[in-house]
């Protein structure tokens, strides 16, 4: 789980260009908006594409997205439970 | 002096409802929708509903966009010539993707012959219309996402009011394209079941394709058979977010209020019908509902969105929906809000559920687009009397700041090289590009928006805070090539499945202008021009058309990026001897009635031409005005060198000009917006007061207080003056 948080955090920093965020500062409790990573809904859609491409995890509704993108922990849990075997 | 009024004297439409005005008129008065499963290109899942034209006109060798535009314009001209008089002297096009429906497949097939992409640029639509329809005059191409063609209607109105044109052909057009479909799909904005604007269960938009064209004629009284009058227009920017509308509809409300004021101080209560933008997305409809209720005090007139019937036709939407307003005025029938069954109680709007016969004299049409761009139009019955509107166009644009970026660096470095006659070719260095740009601000941006922002930062440094611009006019020949390339490449590599929504958002031509507005908090007009080699010149003329003395300053930025894969095939001259060339220029301009300091003014814009006739007309105009210039800076596109040189020779021989001239593209390169660089350098030259010795080859020539003539020659002949 911790590994997955770290792995996802690395990808998120790279894909979204969050080079002012230190990898070691990202924890399970880190949120996505405002005081968290400070990203917005378009960034979330970018992550949705990454999840499908890299993990085979599909998030195709706003409702589902709202339950997955609460914080890094909820994201990692959802990916861990739903990633394709490959 | 009273300004001329702008009457619609010809009209043509092609949409999912059919080809021709009558076919579309019939669609208005029924609840039938014209959405069908998307079939023009294959998609993976069951195809979503779309407003696809069932029998598309075909034109060999060009994209569907061009063919649609031709069909609508031919109809508009046919209906006009039966009662109008005089030739068209301006062609205005609003589009988002231009030739992309063809290019995206050529690129997928790795076609690398530049000849295959001759109709790629958005500006080629207007150029093709001008050539095919035999129209000579100016062309303007606005790429403002979904408010593109409402914006050109406002510019058409100002061309008429200012006397720059007397008979304008204005066309909004977009054909269904894979890039837009997949972009909106990846942004999760598409409802496969079709749009249900303002419905409680609405779940997104559906795409469509269309072209709608108008002939707009100047007159003090309505000509016989006039369809309607364009009474006024309002342009605003949310300056809030690249794709999301302002949650309180602030910009949309401003555009409506401005349009009402522009139409002769109308009150909201004067409006009989509103054609809503109403895409069917949760956020857009919510934002527009708040804006409408704010402007109309919670008591708006009958209203509807047509996107549940015809789809969202993007760059065509503003013109198509203006056509619906004209039909409502002519026929007294208000269309229903197709797709709406149960209005969302949270929106507090009650759009029409059924077609409604109503005597209609004044209508308002809203367009809201990516980049936070809003455009509203007031269209009225031609027989209504209107208050006298006085001409208040600005005489002059005072240059408060000028910047540029080239292969030589910023304006100081570039001017130093240029004045010595040294080439400033190559691309802008990453150091110059990244200067002053906060990493968080630009984290999602690739080359073009960074260029635009770096130019803006440099210009802002020269300006006091109180002169901060409130309007942004951006110009680019080819748009954001890096984002476009990367978005398409990922789609190709994933068999049209996955790509970056951020790249899609950035690939839209007006994305950089939206970023600039957001950074500046610039809530005035926000327009992006894409007219090939004449893009920047179009933005100068349009600034003059929109500017009023007393307005806050206008920011003009012209920029094009060099891209290793795309530039060599889309604009080969910008790849001179294998060296890619890019850059741009920025000006901050303050409109003034009286000439004050360094001032820029548009003088002439005509084409297309294959000979020296337009250059001779320009020479006649200059002679008539008795103007004598201190120097000429001329840009001749590399692929039109012989024609441009002949035009320059004709011009100088008529004028008997003895002033020095510099063919600046030889030194500055051939990207589409190099005129923006040249204009900034011209400001340096006027400030220095002499034509430098490095450019004459002998000694410097004093300008002796005379203005500088800035020319762009070739297919179009364009002249601006710098005093």
Image (tube, grey):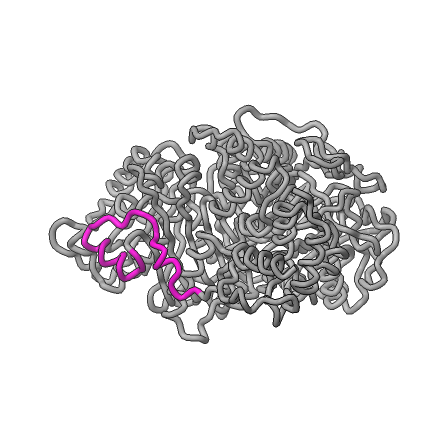
Position of B3 relative to B485 (above/below): below
**Towards the viewer: B551 or B458:** B458
Direction left: furthest residue? B698
Direction top: furthest residue? B60
- Stretch of the chain drawn in magenta: B409-437
Q: Is residue B59 left or right of residue B688?
A: right
Q: Residue at x 70, y 58 (%)?
A: A77
**Towards the viewer: B685 or B45:** B45
Q: Is residue B524 visible?
A: yes
**Towards the viewer: B689 or B61:** B61
Is residue B335 found inside the magenta-colored segment of the image? no
Position of A63 relative to B552 (above/below): above
Picture coordinates of residue A5 (x, y %)? 62, 60
**Towards the viewer: A40 or B652:** A40
Picture coordinates of residue B506 (x, y %)? 54, 51
Q: Is residue B362 visible?
A: no
Picture coordinates of residue B223 (x, y %)? 64, 44
Q: Is residue A86 left or right of residue B415?
A: right
Give the total of numbered labels: 0
Q: Residue at x 59, y 32 (%)?
A: B70
Q: Quadrant of residue A7?
A: bottom right
Q: Quadrant of residue B618?
A: top left
Q: Residue at x 44, y 39 (%)?
A: B566
Q: Residue at x 83, y 53 (%)?
A: B201
Is residue B418 found inside the magenta-colored segment of the image? yes
Position of B141 relative to B268 (above/below): above
Picture coordinates of residue B95 (x, y %)? 58, 44
Instruction: Quarter of the image for the C terminus of chain B: give it.
Output: bottom left
């Amino acid at each position: 789980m911790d590994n997955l948080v770290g792995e996802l955090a690395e990808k998120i920093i790279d894909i979204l260009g969050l080079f002012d965020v230190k990898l070691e500062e990202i924890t399970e409790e880190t949120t996505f908006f405002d005081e968290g990573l400070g990203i917005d809904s378009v960034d979330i859609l970018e992550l949705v594409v990454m999840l499908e491409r890299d993990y085979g995890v599909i998030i195709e509704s706003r409702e589902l997205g709202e339950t997955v993108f609460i914080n890094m922990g909820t994201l990692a849990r959802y990916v861990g439970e739903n990633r394709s075997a490959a | 002096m009273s300004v001329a009024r702008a009457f619609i004297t010809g009209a043509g439409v092609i949409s999912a409802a059919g080809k021709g005005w009558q076919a579309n008129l019939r669609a208005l008065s029924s609840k039938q929708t014209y959405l069908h499963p998307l079939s023009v290109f294959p998609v993976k899942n069951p195809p979503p509903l779309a407003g696809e034209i069932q029998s598309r006109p075909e034109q060999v060798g060009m994209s569907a966009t061009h063919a649609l535009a031709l069909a609508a314009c031919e109809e508009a001209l046919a209906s006009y010539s039966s009662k109008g008089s005089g030739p068209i002297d301006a062609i205005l096009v609003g589009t988002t993707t231009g030739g992309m429906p063809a290019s995206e497949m050529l690129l997928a097939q790795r076609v690398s012959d530049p000849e295959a992409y001759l109709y790629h640029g958005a500006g080629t639509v207007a150029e093709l219309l001008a050539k095919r329809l035999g129209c000579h005059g100016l062309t303007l191409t606005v790429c403002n996402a979904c408010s593109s063609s409402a914006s050109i209607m406002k510019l058409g109105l100002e061309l008429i009011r200012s006397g720059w044109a007397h008979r304008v052909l204005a066309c909004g057009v977009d054909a269904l394209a894979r890039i837009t479909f997949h972009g909106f799909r990846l942004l999760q904005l598409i409802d496969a079941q079709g749009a249900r604007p303002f419905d409680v269960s609405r779940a997104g938009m559906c795409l469509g394709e269309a072209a709608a064209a108008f002939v707009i004629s100047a007159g003090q009284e309505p000509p016989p058979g006039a369809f309607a009058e364009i009474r006024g227009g309002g342009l605003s920017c949310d300056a809030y977010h690249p794709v999301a509308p302002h949650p309180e509809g602030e910009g949309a409300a401003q555009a409506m209020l401005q349009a009402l004021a522009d139409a002769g101080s109308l009150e909201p209560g004067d409006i009989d019908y509103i054609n809503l933008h109403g895409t069917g997305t949760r956020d857009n409809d919510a934002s527009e509902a708040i804006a409408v209720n704010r402007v109309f005090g919670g008591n708006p007139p009958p209203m509807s969105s047509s996107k549940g019937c015809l789809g969202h036709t993007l760059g065509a939407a503003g013109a198509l929906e203006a056509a619906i307003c004209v039909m409502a005025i002519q026929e007294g029938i208000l269309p229903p809000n197709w797709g709406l069954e149960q209005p969302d109680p949270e929106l507090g709007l009650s759009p029409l559920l059924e077609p409604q016969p109503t005597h209609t004299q004044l209508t308002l049409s809203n367009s809201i687009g990516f980049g936070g761009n809003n455009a509203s139009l007031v269209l009225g019955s031609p027989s209504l009397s209107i208050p006298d509107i006085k001409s208040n166009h600005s005489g002059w644009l005072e240059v408060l700041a000028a910047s540029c970026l080239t292969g030589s660096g910023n304006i100081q470095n570039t001017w130093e090289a240029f004045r010595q006659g040294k080439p400033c070719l190559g691309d802008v260095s990453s150091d110059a590009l990244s200067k002053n740009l906060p990493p968080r601000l630009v984290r999602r941006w690739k080359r073009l928006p960074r260029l635009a922002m770096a130019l803006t930062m440099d210009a802002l440094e020269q300006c006091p805070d109180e002169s901060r611009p409130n309007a942004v006019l951006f110009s680019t020949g080819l748009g954001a090539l890096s984002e476009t390339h990367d978005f398409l490449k990922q789609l190709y590599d994933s068999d049209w499945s996955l790509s970056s929504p951020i790249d899609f958002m950035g690939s839209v031509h007006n994305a950089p202008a939206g970023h600039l507005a957001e950074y500046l908090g610039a809530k005035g007009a926000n327009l992006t021009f894409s007219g090939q080699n004449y893009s920047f010149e179009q933005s100068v003329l349009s600034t003059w058309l929109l500017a009023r003395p007393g307005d806050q300053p206008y920011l003009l930025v012209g920029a094009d990026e060099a891209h290793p894969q795309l530039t060599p095939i889309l604009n080969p001259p910008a790849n001179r001897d294998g060296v890619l060339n890019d850059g741009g220029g920025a000006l901050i301009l303050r409109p003034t009635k009286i000439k004050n300091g360094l001032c820029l003014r548009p003088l002439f814009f005509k084409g297309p031409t294959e000979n020296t006739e337009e250059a001779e007309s320009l020479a006649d105009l200059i002679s008539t005005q008795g103007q004598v210039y201190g120097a000429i800076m001329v840009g001749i596109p590399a692929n039109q060198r012989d024609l441009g040189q002949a035009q320059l020779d004709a011009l100088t021989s008529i004028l008997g000009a003895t002033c020095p001239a510099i063919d600046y593209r030889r030194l500055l390169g051939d990207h589409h917006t190099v005129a923006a660089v040249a204009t900034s350098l011209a400001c340096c030259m006027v400030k220095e007061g002499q034509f430098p010795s490095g450019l004459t080859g002998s000694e410097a020539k004093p300008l002796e207080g005379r203005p500088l003539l800035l020319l762009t020659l070739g297919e179009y002949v364009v002249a601006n003056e710098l005093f």
